[in-house]
Structures are given as structure tokens and as C-alpha cells.
Amino acid sequence: MAKKAVEPIMSEDAERFMAFAGVIQWAYAVVEQGKRIEAAVGERIGARGGNRAIALRSQIQTECHLFVIAAWQLIKHREWAGRLGLFEAVIRDLDGFSQDIRDLRNMREHVDEYFQGAGNNKDRWRVQTPEYSADASSLVDTVIGGRLDWTLFSATVGRLIPALLNAPVPAVAPFRLPT
């Protein structure tokens, strides 16, 4: 069977704009999800037992999972933008987070497989440090899954947003921006 030719769905200029806009979009999503985790954790403080406590714990789990997804999308878009020569000096601060975010995203997305004894990299599911023991589904203080400190990552991304917004915008937008 002949290999199918790869045909881009947009011009190179449009791709540059989409990668550029995606980095900014997901940077904002990371910061917003950080606020949502903080609010959910704050609401849970003082809840004692029963269905309300379970509901609040579930809300925190959901917000953490959405944070990991936003962080992963930021990393993916950062890599895409980097391949296109965008934000080269601005986004290096994210380099140290990439592998932990990738692991967390993959493990949390397939949590059912891990709990059933399957899942890739089972040996990395649990993290043991002198301070705590955690698995990829947990939240210990501000550390999601024993790997990603959401307060540190959110603050790092928040500090990058002004530089992202000051970067030169690629020339062509594939759609009309609101005025």
C-alpha cells in the first residue's frame, strides 16, 4: 500500500499563528485552573465526613485533573511553537516540568488501567520521597500525583504571560479576531 501524502490543513503562516495563540490560551488555562484548585481546596477545609466531604474531594480531583490537562496542552503547544521558532527565549522556564507533566497526564488519563493492574510504567505510578508517599492520582499539599506542584507551575506560567503577550504576533490570523 502506498504511503498517504501528508497535506497541511493550513498555510505555514496560519500554523504559526495557531501555535502562538495556543501557547497563550493554555498558559491562561493553567493559571485559571490553579485558581480553581485553590478555591476547591479552600472550600474543603472544614468539611467533615459524609457526602459533602466526598463531593468536595471529587471536585478537587477533577480540578487537579483539568490542571494536568491544561499543563500538558501548554507543553505540547510550547513544543509546537518552538519548532516554528516562536517564544524561544520566553518558554525555557517550562523545561524542567515537561516529563512530570507528560507522566501525570498519561497516568491520570488511564487511571482505571493502573488500578486494574495494567497501565504503562507501573513502576512510576507511586512516588516515594522523604516528605511523602503519593501515587499519580493523589494530591499531597500542593503536589499533584507526587510530581507536579500546581502552585509553583501556575506561578511560573503566570510570570511568563506578560512576555508571551509582548512577543511579536505572527502576521496572519486564520480567523477574524474580535475587536
Image (cartoon, rainbow, N blue to C red):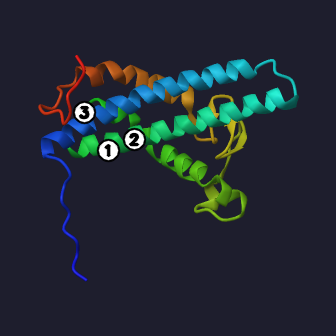
Considering depth in this image, is 167 or 22 the residue closer to the camera? Answer: 22
**Dot 2 crowding, Cα within 10 Å, few <14, some 14–19, many 20+:** many
- The quarter in which the N terminus is drawn is bottom left
Q: Amino acid at mark 3?
A: Phe
**Dot 3 crowding, Cα within 10 Å, few <14, some 14–19, many 20+:** some
Q: CA distance from mark 3 to mark 1?
A: 10 Å
Are discs 2 and 1 less than 8 Å apart at CB? yes
Q: Amino acid at mark 2?
A: Ile
**Dot 1 crowding, Cα within 10 Å, few <14, some 14–19, many 20+:** many
Q: Is residue 21 above or below residue 128?
A: above
Measuring 19% from the left and 54% from the top, which residue is drawn there?
8
Q: Which mark is residue 87?
A: 3
Considering depth in this image, is 179 or 164 the residue closer to the camera? Answer: 179
Measuring 37% from the left and 44% from the top, which residue is drawn there?
76
Q: Which mark is residue 75?
A: 2
Which residue in the protein does label 1 denote? 79
Are discs 3 and 1 less than 8 Å apart at CB? no
Q: Position of residue 59 (x, y in %)?
A: 68, 31
* Label 1: element kind: helix
